[in-house]
Image (cartoon, grey):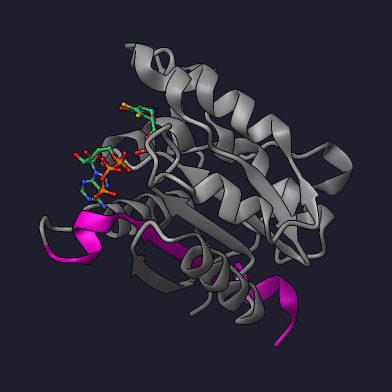
Amino acid sequence: MTEASSGPEAITIGIVSISDRASSGIYEDKGLPALRDWMGRALTNPISFEARLIPDDLSTISQTLIELVDAGCALVLTTGGTGPALRDVTPEATLAVADKEMPGFGEQMRRISLEFVPTAILSRQVAVIRGKTLIMNLPGQPRAIAEILEGLKDAEGRPKVAGIFAAVPYCIDLIGGPYLETDDSVCKAFRPKTAVKPIRPPAG
Ligand SMILES: Nc1ncnc2c1ncn2[C@@H]1O[C@H](COP(=O)(O)OP(=O)(O)OP(=O)(O)O)[C@@H](O)[C@H]1O
Ligand SMILES: Nc1nc2c(c(=O)[nH]1)N[C@H]1C(S)=C(S)[C@@H](COP(=O)(O)O)O[C@H]1N2
């Protein structure tokens, strides 16, 4: 079978919910379902998820991120632990495993979130590259996940503030990862014209 008829390539995505209370069963985790749901709607690639629910512990977080990169995840998304509280150490644990920092993502995340809540200024999310994997922190508030990834749309559904996910596929191209394809009605990926591959029909 040629590549042109095989549809988008299969990818592995790591999703990590970092919460003392959700990981100890005090409340139900809503982070992993929100990440799974949004990625499943936004991407047309077949996805297998590597999911982890862990407490706000620095070495556990760093170890989990390394494990997911080593498992071949093209993208790892975390939720939780980005605020100023003593137990919030997700950014530090992420920077500890970074080859490169990608500050534009954190800047745009806070810009988007400020359209929703003034406390967005308290959020310290970072994005980094480790090997061929992009790792990004999102806040713990489950509804913040779609807000940040997708951005803000006007009443007619036109983008008002660009979500950060629009830049993710091209970033992953540049680090040698798989070619991510999006459903434009959820999130239109931006790539320079020279980097766009022809649309391939789904397999089957
Ligand atoms: N995994 C989760 N599932 C459901 N709700 C969550 C989750 N993580 C956070 N939240 C909600 O978002 C709020 C802010 O998240 P934050 O990461 O700051 O949690 P926290 O207050 O540090 O506590 P914890 O780490 O125990 O979740 C929480 O108070 C909770 O209402
Ligand atoms: N889009 C969006 N961003 C948001 C929020 C939100 O509700 N929506 N909550 C904020 C709040 S209240 C905090 S304290 C910070 C840090 O959240 P975390 O500690 O749960 O990661 O994220 C902020 N970012």
- Residue 127 is at least partly visible in this image: yes
Q: In the displayed image of the protein, which residue is found farthest to the right?
A: 194
User: Could you tell me which quadrant the N terminus lies in?
Assistant: bottom right
Q: In the displayed image of the protein, which residue is found farthest to the front?
A: 86
Image coordinates for residue 163, horizontal then vertical, percent: 52, 30
Residue nearest the observer in this picture, 55 or 50: 55
- Residue 157 is at least partly visible in this image: no
Residue 84 picture quarter: top left
Residue nearest the observer in this picture, 51 or 94: 94
Q: Give the vertical position of 23 relative to 101 (above or below).
A: below
Image coordinates for residue 110, horizontal then vertical, percent: 52, 23
> Which residue is at 83% across, 53% downward?
174
Picture quadrant of ligand 1: top left
Image coordinates for residue 178, horizontal then vertical, percent: 70, 66
> What segment carries the magenta color?
1-25
Residue 5 picture quarter: bottom right
Q: Give the vertical position of 77 relative to 120 (above or below).
A: below
